[in-house]
């Protein structure tokens, strides 16, 4: 009974249960909290999870961090590359300008993310429409969204109508983050479409950070331009 209930939890690949020395060895694809495991045990009978020692709690937290890093490794690497390249571009100039670096970063961000979405446009649209507030109501918005990202990347490179570009970025990313937050609050297990279908990334905190970063940068540049003018 315990094994069957544990295997019903999404993310558990294998569960070996022995009662002689009450113990369960579980193989997970992602971090699963002790509360989730306890809830499964409650369905099987009057069983309780007991930590063998204090080190187990630390090991669990370490495993959680390792799994999180492994899960989001693609997006973390892409973010690091875009930051590094945009910094190097600006560093080669006589004067380092933060505003220009931000434009370079946003251009690289939109360019890379739209590239991965274009590899499987239909797959992206199917995934994105499961959680985005606009795409849920109008499926074709998923397709339009990709080309808006690509257009924003080009616009930030050539620096055309930056007032309008920053406003569009602010609106687009604000709409996008709403669906992400709703999915997380409802604890829905949904695949993140930020890198298309190439990587199997679940929606999580880093998805919010990614959207919030672009919202903050576009809003910040709008504020700076407003104050300067």
Image (cartoon, rainbow, N blue to C red):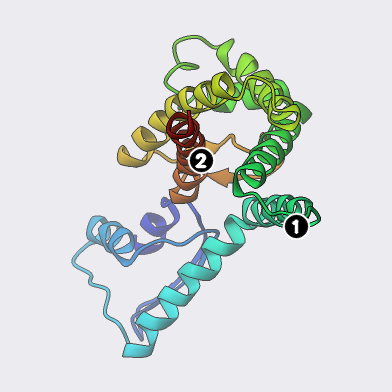
- Farthest residue toward the left? 46
Q: Residue at 38% across / 30% down in the picture?
A: 178
The relative height of residue 117 versus residue 2 in the rendered view (above or below) is above
Which disc, if any, is residue 91?
Answer: 1
- Is residue 4 rendered to the left or right of residue 88? left
Q: How many residues crowd mark 2 within 10 Å: few (<14), some (14–19), many (20+)? A: some
Q: Residue at 65% across / 38% down in the picture?
A: 103
Looking at the image, tell me whether mark 2 or mark 1 is earlier in sequence order: 1
Q: How many residues crowd mark 1 within 10 Å: few (<14), some (14–19), many (20+)? A: few
- Is residue 143 rendered to the left or right of residue 226? right
Which disc, if any, is residue 217?
Answer: 2
x and y percent of residue 43 in the render? 25, 55
Q: 160 or 15: which is nearer to us?
A: 160
Q: Residue at 72% across / 50% down in the picture?
A: 86
Asked which secondary structure carries label 1, the reply is: helix
- Is residue 76 rendered to the left or right of residue 225? right
**Residue 135 visible from this viewpoint:** yes
Q: 72 or 146: which is nearer to us?
A: 146
Residue 69 in which image quadrant: bottom right
- Do callouts 2 and 1 mark residues in contact (Cβ within 8 Å)? no
x and y percent of residue 134 in the render? 45, 16
Q: Quadrant of the N terminus?
A: bottom left
Q: Residue at 51% across / 59% down in the picture?
A: 30
x and y percent of residue 201 in the render? 58, 46
Mark 2 or mark 1, whichever is nearer to me: 1
Residue 61 in which image quadrant: bottom left
Asked which secondary structure carries label 2, the reply is: helix
């Amino acid at each position: 009974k315990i094994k069957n209930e544990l295997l019903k939890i999404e993310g558990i690949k294998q569960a070996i249960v022995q009662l002689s020395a009450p113990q369960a060895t579980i193989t997970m694809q992602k971090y699963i909290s002790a509360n989730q495991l306890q809830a499964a045990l409650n369905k099987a009978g009057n069983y309780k999870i007991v930590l063998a020692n204090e080190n187990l709690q630390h090991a669990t937290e370490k495993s959680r961090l390792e799994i999180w890093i492994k899960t989001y490794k693609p997006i973390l690497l892409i973010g690091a590359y875009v930051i590094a390249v945009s910094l190097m571009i600006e560093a080669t100039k006589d004067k380092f300008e933060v505003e220009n670096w931000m434009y370079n970063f946003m251009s690289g961000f939109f360019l890379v993310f739209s590239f991965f979405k274009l590899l499987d446009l239909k797959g992206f649209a199917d995934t994105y429409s499961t959680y985005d507030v606009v795409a849920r109501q109008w499926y074709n918005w998923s397709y339009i969204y990709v080309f808006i990202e690509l257009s924003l990347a080009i616009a930030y490179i050539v620096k055309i109508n930056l007032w309008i570009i920053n406003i569009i970025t602010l609106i687009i990313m604000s709409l996008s983050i709403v669906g992400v937050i709703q999915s997380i609050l409802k604890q829905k297990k949904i695949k993140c479409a930020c890198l298309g279908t190439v990587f199997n990334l679940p929606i999580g905190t880093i998805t919010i950070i990614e959207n919030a970063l672009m919202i903050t940068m576009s809003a910040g540049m709008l504020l700076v331009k407003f104050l300067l003018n």
